[in-house]
């Protein structure tokens, strides 16, 4: 039997037990391919100790990262790539593929591309979303992210974009480098939660948060300005909705105080910051039981929380940007940041009948099953790694 194709994945925090978008992607990819003898994954994991272990039949190696503040991410990616190169050399691996998630280490890319090519390998990159546009970064850091993205686009063999909008942006912005790109989306679950409507875990959570099934609009996501929490809160407060608005997010006190000053949301009992939920089955059930879901993300590619909402919640109210339209198409309702847009949509959504809501929910779930299921995404990656980029065209 021929040797398997070795794929080295760098850039996630590692598996198992991390819950970001890239971490979930690596977890699902290795899970769906764990019995595939044609593929052998090697996954970098950020940790305090140096050791190797097996998970989903992937070779996972810990990379020790010193506590050096924001530069940690850059140090981690470079150290992980050095470890990949050493492993490839030590084990005489032929034709390896090194797949880097996110564009953090542009200044080092020309070097690593040369080294990997000399070893007979290929260098693939997932450019993520527009990291340089995120409001949390200072102006110098944003400039670094933009330059890093440019250099990584220039010095790689393929960019795997998880959004068609990102793929178009790469060609428009960096056409002079003639980048080779391929669209493979992020994935989502298509099943229902394993919890029943009367599960004590669910009922206890509802009791603690002052909520009940179908009584609330929901948002799940990182607590950052570009996810438009201010607009969603302000517009909900302006609505006459009798529902609650539950926000599942990791609250930052500074941003929370800022929002409180700007909106006065603490005077509206309908708005409930309910903390984080890391129990996957419970979170799925909370999504399923939401009356509706708000999605205000406007930076980044295909967003995991949007896919999960479309797979679970029937009624989805999305910010009208290309990324979100591309994913949901006509299975959701859309709002803009113009004052009054979302509150008017909430008014309309509150008055929709059960059949209208159910029809939207069926469309959304069909959209996820057809184009975004993890099985479908895993198959796309198998084709890419075994047959090359042209197989995806």
Image (tube, rainbow, N blue to C red):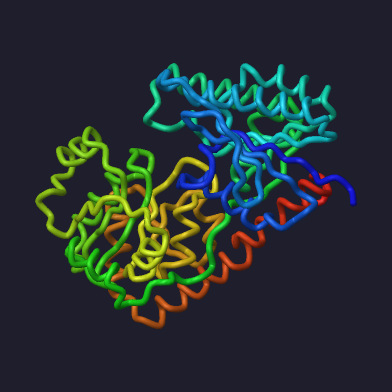
> Residue at the spot x=36%, y=57% of the render?
294
- Left or right: 129 with respect to 296? right
Report which quarter residue 237 is drawn in. Answer: bottom left
Q: Would residue 171 be visible to someone looking at this image?
A: no
- Vertical position of residue 141 compared to residue 273: above or below: above
- Vertical position of residue 12 compared to residue 75: above or below: below
Q: Would residue 376 be visible to someone looking at this image?
A: yes
- Vertical position of residue 93 compared to residue 311: above or below: above
> Residue at the spot x=83%, y=22% of the render?
118
In this rendered view, identify the residue nearer to me: 371 or 279: 279
In this rendered view, identify the residue nearer to me: 48 or 352: 48
In this rendered view, identify the residue nearer to me: 212 or 208: 208
- Left or right: 31 with respect to 196? right
In this rendered view, identify the residue nearer to me: 251 or 36: 36
In x, y percent, where is residue 108?
A: 64, 18
> Residue at the spot x=56%, y=55% of the render?
326
Q: How many marks?
A: 0
* Residue sitting farthest toward the left: 267
In x, y percent, where is residue 148?
A: 58, 22
In x, y percent, where is residue 170?
A: 65, 35
In x, y percent, where is residue 296?
A: 38, 50
- Left or right: 216 with respect to 67? left
Report which quarter residue 344 is drawn in. Answer: bottom left
* Residue sitting farthest toward the right: 1
């Amino acid at each position: 039997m021929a040797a398997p194709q070795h794929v080295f994945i760098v850039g996630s925090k590692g598996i198992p037990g991390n819950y970001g978008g890239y971490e979930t992607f690596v977890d699902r990819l290795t899970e769906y391919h764990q019995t595939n003898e044609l593929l052998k994954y090697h996954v970098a994991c950020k940790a305090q100790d140096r050791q190797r272990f097996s998970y989903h039949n992937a070779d996972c190696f810990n990379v020790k990262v010193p506590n050096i503040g924001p530069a940690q991410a850059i140090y981690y990616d470079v150290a992980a790539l050095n470890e990949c190169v050493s492993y490839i050399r030590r084990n005489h691996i032929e034709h390896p593929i090194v797949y880097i998630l996110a564009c953090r280490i542009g200044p080092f890319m020309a070097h690593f591309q040369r080294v990997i090519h000399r070893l007979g390998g290929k260098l693939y990159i997932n450019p993520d979303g527009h990291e340089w546009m995120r409001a949390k970064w200072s102006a110098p850091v944003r400039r670094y992210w933009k330059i890093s993205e440019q250099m990584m686009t220039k010095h790689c063999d393929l960019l795997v974009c998880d959004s068609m909008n990102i793929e178009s942006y790469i060609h428009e912005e960096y056409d002079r480098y003639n980048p080779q790109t391929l669209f493979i989306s992020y994935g989502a679950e298509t099943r229902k939660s394993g919890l029943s409507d009367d599960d004590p875990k669910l009922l206890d959570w509802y009791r603690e948060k002052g909520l009940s099934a179908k009584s609330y609009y929901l948002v799940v996501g990182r607590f950052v300005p570009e996810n438009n929490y201010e607009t969603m809160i302000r517009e909900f407060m302006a609505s006459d909705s009798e529902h609650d608005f539950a926000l599942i997010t990791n609250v930052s006190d500074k941003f929370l105080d800022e929002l409180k000053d700007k909106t006065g949301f603490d005077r509206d009992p309908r708005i409930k910051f309910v903390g984080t939920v890391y129990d996957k089955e419970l979170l799925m059930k909370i999504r399923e039981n939401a009356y509706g879901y708000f999605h205000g993300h406007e930076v980044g590619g295909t967003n995991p929380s949007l896919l999960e909402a479309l797979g679970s919640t029937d009624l989805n109210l999305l910010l009208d940007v290309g990324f979100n339209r591309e994913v949901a198409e006509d299975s959701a309702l859309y709002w803009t940041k113009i004052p009054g847009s979302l509150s008017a949509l909430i008014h309309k959504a509150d008055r929709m009948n059960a059949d209208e809501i159910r029809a939207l929910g069926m469309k959304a779930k069909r959209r996820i099953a057809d184009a975004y299921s993890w099985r479908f995404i895993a198959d796309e990656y198998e084709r890419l790694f075994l047959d090359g980029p042209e197989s995806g065209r």
